[in-house]
Amino acid sequence: MLRYLRLLGVQFRASAAIAVQYRVEFLVRAGLALFWTGWTLVPLLVVYGARTAVAGWSFDEALVVVGWFTLLKGVLEGAVNPSLTAVVEHIRKGTLDFVLLKPADAQFLVSTAKFEPARVADLAGAAAVFAVAFHRMGRAPTPEGLLLAAVLLACAVAILYSLWILVISAAFVVVKVDNLSFLFVSIYDAARWPADVFRGGLRFVFTFVVPLAVMTTFPAEALLGRLGPARAALIAAGALAFSVLARVVWLRSIARYTSASS
Amino acid sequence: MRRTLKALPTLLEVGFAEAVAYRAEFLVWLLSTNMPLVMLALWTAVARDAPVGRFGQRDFVAYFLAALVVRMMTGAWVIWELNFEIREGTLALRLLRPIHPLVAYAAENLAALPLRALVTLPVAVGALLVVGRERVTHDPLLLALFPVTVAGAWLITFLAMAIIGSLAFRLEQAGSVFEVWLGLFGVFSGYLVPLELFPRWVETLARALPFRYMLAFPVELVIGMTPRARALAELGIQWGFVALLGLGASAAWRLGLRRFSAVGG
């Protein structure tokens, strides 16, 4: 366990070194991340310019959802996306062999291969959005709410990561999946709206197939103190089951991997 | 010029074959154009009790389905190719051919249109069934002009991508510039929010920018929200932007090319 923590530290330092080396790029990316955070608020402002509440969500409450959206987008594009894009490249070129030969768990190695430190800007953006939302409501989240939200954040990251592992596992079969990642990012965009807005088929898809509701709406509800512990436990169980599934699928696909070279 | 025209059918054929060969990838790209459906769901939820401005629930449905159709028919991806080929140096191969690379790119992008139409047509027919015949413009002239506006929208999209892609000759960060462009597009083209629902000054600003003519203009025209006189005036503006960006693209290309040197062989 300690060994893996140390490995994680090494991988982190390598990414940080690259970021320090390309300073302009770091600044451009961080600036862009902030630009997007501000820019995604535009439709929200227009919607709430016309209405005071949509599907039971007031402006301030919807802001909390946007905060979670920004936070998870930062996690997705800062910690999950870069490494896993690199794996697809490894699979295509056959260089995954070198990773598999190393004396550590392959899933751990490929998932921590690359970080993008510039995405810290997203976390700052999310914090600012949360601060504005709770300031406008004139109250702070309760300690229980915070605790539940933290648990749900862990669940959301686990689900996000598991979804990616499933996509990568598909790469062993169909090789070209970089556009699948593009598709996922485009779907994830819907998560900036409270899931209650969607009805019928979309609602079903966003709760069970691509669980966007679990990623942003439920944590927001927890932070607002509207989510009971029973429902949170249910979500946690679902996230755990999903993670186990992803791990099993990964182990099976890696067993089927035949190098692309020679 | 004559040589280019003679090569064009072959180029289109090759592009079409390519699109058919990578059909799975093609489908994924099309599926990622799902934003109008999300915005449709959102705005119909907002308009459930009362209309927003001129827009009732059914107007939003008509608007965003039309937006989906226009967006699917005006897809271009030349910027990614250009970026990649400039950085890898494979552009050198294109430069050797006796045809302007931008024309070749345009042919490749256009060649995918029949396949795109195949997917778009059911959407369009479905949209017509859902929203009803009365949500489509009654003006036969405007209806006939709709394909022209879509062609103009595609040209603006393609030429803007070519200009930003040409920046890759000089900049490392052409991708970031395009990201900003996409952000501006999202707001000022009416992709996320019909432009009428913005404050007045944003709407006025949007009329002076090219984004509106890439999406909102054809959409509003086909769902009958623009009277004939204004539609004709806007058509003029749209093609003015096409001419302007065409000049810009050819200049950016020529300026950029001077800096190009392929590495390796």
Image (cartoon, coloured by chain):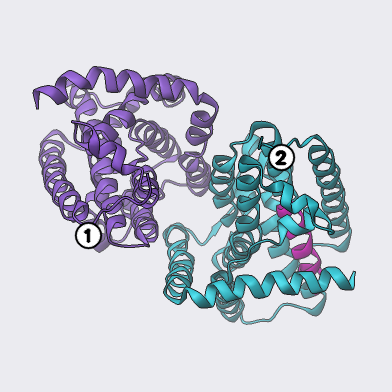
Q: Of circles 1 and 2, which is in front?
A: 2
Q: CA–CA distance between discs 1 and 2?
A: 40 Å
- Magenta part mainly helix, strand or loop? helix
Q: Is residue A228 toward the left or the right of residue A81 in the image? A: right
**Location of residue B187 in the rendering, given as x and y in whole percent from the top left corner:** 36, 55
Residue A157 sits inside the magenta stretch: yes
Q: Mark 1 lies on which chain?
A: B
Q: Mark 2 lies on which chain?
A: A
Q: Residue at x 30, y 21 (%)?
A: B12
Colour in which the image shows chain A = cyan
**Location of residue A211 in the rendering, given as x and y in whole percent from the top left corner:** 71, 47
Colour in which the image shows chain B = purple
Q: Can I make out residue A35 in this image?
A: yes
- The quarter of the displayed image where residue A70 is located: bottom right
Query: Are labels 1 and 2 on one chain?
Result: no
Mark 1: which secondary structure? helix
**Location of residue B60 in the rendering, given as x and y in whole percent from the top left corner:** 42, 40
Mark 2: which secondary structure? helix
Q: Mark 1 points at which residue?
A: B205
Q: Give the range drawn in magenta.
A: A147-161
For disc 1, the neighbor class at 10 Å (few under 14, some 14 to 19, many from 20) is few
Q: Is residue A233 toward the left or the right of residue A106 in the image? A: right
- The quarter of the displayed image where residue A77 is located: bottom right
Q: Name the residue under label 2.
A: A209
